[in-house]
């Protein structure tokens, strides 16, 4: 039997990782729709294996509906909901969980196959093992998030929502990064770029990730449904009701605060992205793919900001909100690719 690949390059492994990343991207978008439709608490039990089978009879549907009717969300928000209406929110949540299971299978089964045939680059085995563990952790965190809305709340806790999204985006970015490693192989020599592109690209990637977390807090507090004017917030630059009862209440639970924070960091991200695009076009060291990625960062960031403003002013309709979440994941993907690429220049 041949040994594991030593040069760190495998196009099949790269294609597999990029494919799983695409599934994670889909799951992130569907997850956003699940929250926007108020569907996330419709399935009140965590059944990692048997939960893949939806209700198959009228009696089974009524059993699941009865479980939902015992939740605070039904009692306080959706009392009187029909069984047919329940099925609508159930299918959103079931689809989101099904995609999570599909991601796990799409990663684990080929991974085992690559290991069994010794066709996995040796230096990527430990990374892919960590990705597998991260995916399992994401499932646990997903249930931890849902559980926060089944006792005293009518929605999930915003900080748990941000944690759940954050882990999904870390997994998404890590899949892209590792896929690029598999596609290109181990570098023959360390890149000689020394004009600040490496730290700048990593800092920008971190800023985009932070902005995604702030967006999750906006979503978790339904802060996109208030202060729907722009560029001011209900006529103010700085909302007078910004502060909550404590620092944590302000940071994670004050709707005006989380929207204001999301806006301010958005401005910083757009300015930085446009700066990166301009610097990339004028750089003497960035060529080809690196220059294209730098330009893409600027274009996507500006477009994403415009969609965000339109979504806010339209009171967050489902289609625009989903497009905004998809745009955030796309920007993160491009920022990840840029950060990886400039390491090889």
Image (cartoon, rainbow, N blue to C red):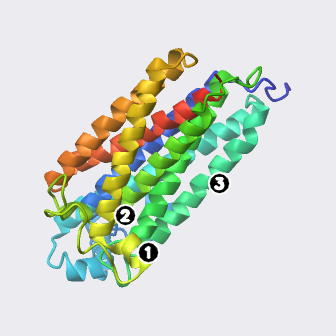
Q: Are marks 1 and 2 in contact (CB under 8 Å)?
A: no
Q: Is residue 133 visible?
A: yes
| N-terminal-most mark, 3 or 2 | 3
Question: Against 22, is 86 above or below?
Answer: below
Q: Residue drawn 21% across and 47% down?
A: 309
Q: Which disc number belongs to residue 217?
A: 2
Find residue 20 and report its horizontal and vertical position in percent: 52, 38
Q: Is residue 56 visible?
A: no
Instruction: Determine which quarter of the picture holds residue 115.
Output: top right
| N-terminal-most mark, 1 or 2 | 1
Q: Nearer the viewer, mark 1 or mark 2?
A: 2
- 230 displayed left or right of 14: left
Instruction: Determine which quarter of the picture holds residue 60.
Output: bottom left
- Badge 1: residue crowd in 10 Å (few <14, some 14–19, many ≥20): many
Q: Secondary structure at mark 1?
A: helix
- Badge 3: residue crowd in 10 Å (few <14, some 14–19, many ≥20): few
Cα distance in 3D space between marks 1 and 3? 21 Å
Q: Give the camera-side residue of 40 and 46.
A: 40
Count how many numbered circles sit on residues in the image.
3
Find residue 209 and report its horizontal and vertical position in percent: 47, 49
Q: Secondary structure at mark 3?
A: helix
Q: What residue is disc 1 on?
A: 147
Q: Secondary structure at mark 2?
A: helix
């Amino acid at each position: 039997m041949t040994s594991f690949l030593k040069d760190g390059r495998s196009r099949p492994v790269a294609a597999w990782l990029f494919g799983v990343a695409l599934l994670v991207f889909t799951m992130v978008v569907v997850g956003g729709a699940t929250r926007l439709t108020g569907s996330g608490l419709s399935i009140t039990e965590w059944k990692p294996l048997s939960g893949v089978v939806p209700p198959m009879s009228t009696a089974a549907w009524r059993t699941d509906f009865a479980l939902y009717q015992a939740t605070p969300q039904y009692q306080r928000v959706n009392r009187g909901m029909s069984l047919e209406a329940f099925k609508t929110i159930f299918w959103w949540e079931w689809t989101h969980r099904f995609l999570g299971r599909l991601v796990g299978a799409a990663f684990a089964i080929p991974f085992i196959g690559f290991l069994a045939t010794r066709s996995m680059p040796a230096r990527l085995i430990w990374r892919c093992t960590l990705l597998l563990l991260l995916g399992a952790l994401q499932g646990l965190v997903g249930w931890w998030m849902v559980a926060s809305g089944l006792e005293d709340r009518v929605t999930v806790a915003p900080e748990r929502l941000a944690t759940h999204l954050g882990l999904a985006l870390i997994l998404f970015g890590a899949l892209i990064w590792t896929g690029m490693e598999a596609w290109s192989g181990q570098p023959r020599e360390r890149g000689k770029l020394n004009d600040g592109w490496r730290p700048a690209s990593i800092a920008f990637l971190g800023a985009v990730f932070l902005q995604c977390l702030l967006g999750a807090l906006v979503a978790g507090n339904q802060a996109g449904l208030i202060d729907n004017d722009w560029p001011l917030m209900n006529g103010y630059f700085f909302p007078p009701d910004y502060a909550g009862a404590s620092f944590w209440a302000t940071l994670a639970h004050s709707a005006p605060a989380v929207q204001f924070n999301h806006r301010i960091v958005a401005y910083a991200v757009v300015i930085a992205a446009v700066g990166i695009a301009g610097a990339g076009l004028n750089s003497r060291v960035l060529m080809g793919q690196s220059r294209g990625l730098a330009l893409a960062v600027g274009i996507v960031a500006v477009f994403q900001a415009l969609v965000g403003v339109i979504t806010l002013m339209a009171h967050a309709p489902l289609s625009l909100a989903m497009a905004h979440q998809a745009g955030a994941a796309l920007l993160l993907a491009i920022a990840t690719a840029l950060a990886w690429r400039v390491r090889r220049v």
